[in-house]
Image: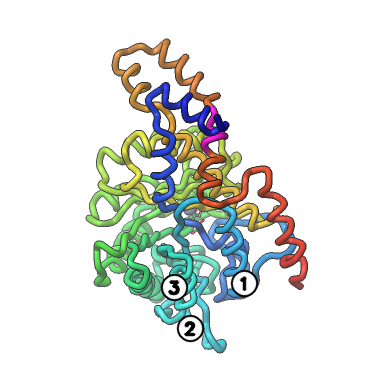
Amino acid sequence: MSNYEAAKASYAALGVDTDAAIAKLKEIPVSVHCWQLDDVIGFDHDGPLTGGIQTTGNYPGKATTSEQLFADMEKALSLAPGKKKINVHACYAIFEDGKFVDRDQIEPKHFVKWVEFAKKHNMGLDFNPTFFSHPKVKDGLTLSSPDEETRKFWINHGKACIRISEYFAKETGVPCVMNIWSGDGYKDIPADRMGPRMRYKDAIEQILSEPYDRDMVKPCVESKVFGIGVESYTVGSAEFTLSFAATHEGCMPLMDNGHYHPTEVVSDKIPAMLCFYPEIALHITRPVRWDSDHVVLFDDETKEMAKEIVRCNGLDRVYMALDYFDASINRISALATGLRSWQKALLNAMVTPNELLKDLQDKNELTKLMVMQEACKTLPLGEVWEEYLRQCDVVTDFAFYDEVKDYEENILKKRA
Ligand code: RNT
Ligand code: ZN
């Protein structure tokens, strides 16, 4: 009997079908962000990263052209199993022959290369307007700015992004999630907390008034508690975005698990939201003491989030996207490690005997529930994971590093 066959039998004894879990996991799309590969810079500006977010580290070999970014992305994708989408930010527009246009003027033609890349790999695309790293961020504000012209510029950017999202969806045949996040806020105590929020609300409504196919473009709004240099007040707070999504049909709330107070957990918020929203979106990240955007690992909260999605039967109601950026380690390894971790967490969730555990809870057999939950932690998940990797033709956890190192030696080190 192979190790996998033995593992399969251990799970079967608890009523879990590991073959079915593996087959299902292959079909669940996870959106892979392009911005880990170049420290959230993009191709449309030379300035620094702003908006209250920051990358730290200076690991050599970062992608600085679209060709390099596509090559690195291809490598990262080959290192992780499962079905993927690519998550693109508007600042990753590609201007052929140096024909630059500003963000309020971007068009589908500036993203043709992304569509080609997605089609080549048989993937869908997600999209994000970029409300940061730009001279028109006025006094730290975009969509909520009191300055009419500034607001108009960013509203037009949002509308342009709706059109590009629709283009992505039509070209790939896969719905495109368009996420609205801005770092708008104040470093110190504001005198008016409602005014910026009323302007933000109106601006997002104007963006969403752009006509689009509701089945193909899925807008969402991402909340945040604070950013660097924006510690006292964030316009798009949790209550704001949640209420916005609740009152605007077709607009989803997006929860980034780095965007809450440190003792709050998104794993507990997922089932709460699924009681009310037909669909929700996630940014999966790893906050270390703050919204640090560390690489996602196979840690307790990551496992718990995946379990909740699976237990709530939410796999087709939750849009899962990765969001982290570490510049201190090999960026391709970073991107692939996070994706592998999330895949592992999903697999773990799918082979957990959820029905059996729920039943114990409902019968109030809480002593046995604790014992069983502890016992499940040492089930032979590794064997099932290895079988999944084998079937997907992807390297094992132990062979993974050598692949990354080869690419670093042969490609990254040759970059200036
Ligand atoms: C920032 C948000 C946001 C960004 C991306 C680049 O705190 O998490 O999602 O990370 O848009
Ligand atoms: Zn995010």
Q: CA distance from mark 3 to mark 2?
A: 19 Å
For disc 1, the marked residue is: 47
Circles 2 and 1, Cβ within 8 Å, touching? The answer is no
Mark 1 lies on a secondary structure that is loop
- The numbered disc on residue 115 is 3
Residue 90: give x, y in percent of width and height.
47, 70
First along the sequence among labels 1 and 3: 1
Q: Residues within 10 Å of mark 3 (few under 14, many from 20)?
A: many
Q: Say what amino acid the circle numbered 2 marks.
A: Val
Q: Is residue 289 visible?
A: yes
Q: Nearer the viewer, residue 129 or 201?
A: 129
| Residue at image point 57% right, 31% down | 3
In the displayed structure, 232 sits above or below 199; it is above
In the displayed structure, 71 sits above or below 182; it is below
> Disc 2 or disc 1, which is closer to the eye?
2
The boundaries of the magenta stretch are 380-384
In the displayed structure, 377 sits above or below 138; it is above
Q: Say what amino acid the circle numbered 3 marks.
A: Val
Label 1 beta carbon within 8 A of ligand 1: no
Q: Say what amino acid the circle numbered 1 marks.
A: Gly
Q: Is residue 191 visible?
A: no
First along the sequence among labels 2 and 1: 1
Residue 315: give x, y in percent of width and height.
35, 44
Q: Is residue 300 magenta?
A: no
- The numbered disc on residue 101 is 2
Q: Which image quarter is the C terminus in?
A: bottom right
